[in-house]
Amino acid sequence: MQRRGGISRLYTEVLPRLLTMDPDLEVVLYLRRKLKGGALPNAPRLDYLHEGSISPWHWIYGKRRAQAQLLSRAYRRTSCDLFQGTYFSLPITLRTPYVVTVYDTMDEIYAENISSKEHNRLLRLKSRCIQSADLIFSISHSTTADIVRFHRVDPAKIVTVHLGVSLQFRVVRDERLKQVFLQRFGLGRPFFLYVGNRAGVKNFQRLLHAYVYSNCGADIDLVTVGGEPAFTEQELLIIREHQLEHSVKHLPDLDDENLAIAYNLALAFLYPSSYEGFGLPVLEAMACGAPVIASKVASIPEVAGEAALYVHPEEIGEIAAALCQVRQEDCRKALVRAGLRQAERFSWDDTARTMLDAYRKIL
């Protein structure tokens, strides 16, 4: 379903490692037809099965039901020993052990604030998948605790499996690459970096207000990467009100090589989320030598350890103070050293090994 993002990165990194670690393992990856090319992992004994075509009538009136039937048909025809849903997909009838990965419990935590037919449908599907599972992977201890709290499942069924840092995210020594990046995107001043979606729990508007309050816009830019196209009307209102049109900048989605350079160049990486199931960008930034300012909530302290400058996500003054504090060279150097050490604790090899051990216990 997803060309880029944390979920697709998990399987792109883990599947080839699993196949290397166990020469007897074979994997069939069931795909939506629209997902092709470089977004997919490649490894020996990794085959692809594409979703069949769905008639226009079903797309309009019964898309999900038709997709569930196609998935169930593929599952019956594939002589697999185990079925894993990379998101919340479940065959109509199970004949093998079933595994599901839970990436966060945001839908449960904010259920009262997000009341819609679509959201309620997702909650029911998610609950059915979790209750049906023989094995549940959770990407943080914080998420594991929330799964038990909201779904009342046996904790023995849950295996916490931390994510890792991809090799592309590293300290870049080539100054020429950095200069090319700065010239390409017209970045002439030091900048704070924000990466990804800016809506909801990502808390970006409070970050904007904190940036204004800190008065950093006078000599430091705020650069956002990816997420929504450019800025929303509400974000533009704040930017224009405080005359920050030349200080707050948006870059499109970057490939990993350019994103790593952005992390390397950032005065600090900002992660003011009110909730996260893991917080992969924090690790990526640390591995690239970027000082990190992050919220001390949910899974983020579990990932960042003692290597971040923590703030309360709802305290604009506190965030602003951290933006000022990280400008001090001693503070930045200490955060960089601690961040590089912290990032080394998270490995995709460890992720794959933990998952493989868990599979073996239920097969």
Image (cartoon, helix red, strand yellow):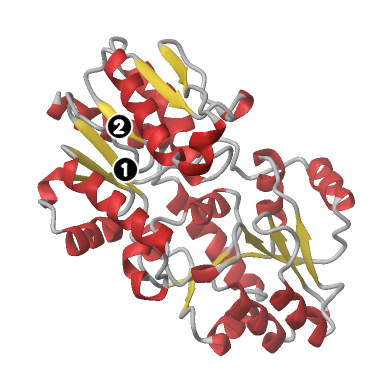
Q: Is residue 1 visible?
A: no
Residue 310 in the image, given as x and y percentages of width and height: 47, 74
Residue 304 in the image, given as x and y percentages of width and height: 43, 60
Q: Nearer the viewer, residue 19 or 33?
A: 33
- Closer to the N terminus: mark 2 or mark 1? 2
| Quadrant in which the C terminus is drawn | top left
Q: Nearer the viewer, residue 128 or 300?
A: 128
Q: Is residue 51 visible?
A: yes
Residue in the image at 73% along x and 67% along y: 231
Q: Nearer the viewer, residue 167 or 200?
A: 200
Q: Label 2 is placed on what type of residue?
A: Gln
Residue 81 in the image, given as x and y percentages of width and height: 21, 18
Residue in the image at 51% along x and 30% along y: 32
Q: Is residue 300 left or right of residue 35?
A: left
Secondary element type, mark 1: strand
Mark 2, residues whose alpha carbon is within 10 Å: few (<14), some, or many (≥20)?
A: some
- In the image, residue 49 sits, relative to residue 320, either above or below, namely above
Q: Is residue 308 left or right of residue 93?
A: right
Q: Look at the numbered discs 2 and 1 and tell me whether their residues touch, using CB distance below 8 Å.
A: yes
Which residue is labeled 2 in the image?
84
Instruction: State which quadrant residue 25 falls in.
Output: top left
- In the image, residue 277 sits, relative to residue 270, either above or below, namely above
Residue in the image at 61% along x and 67% along y: 332
Q: Label 1 is placed on what type of residue?
A: Thr
Which residue is labeled 1 in the image?
101
Secondary element type, mark 2: strand
Q: Is residue 68 left or right of residue 257?
A: left
Q: Nearer the viewer, residue 356 or 330?
A: 356
Instruction: State which quadrant residue 212 falls in.
Output: bottom right
Mark 1, residues whose alpha carbon is within 10 Å: few (<14), some, or many (≥20)?
A: many
Q: Is residue 214 left or right of residue 344?
A: right
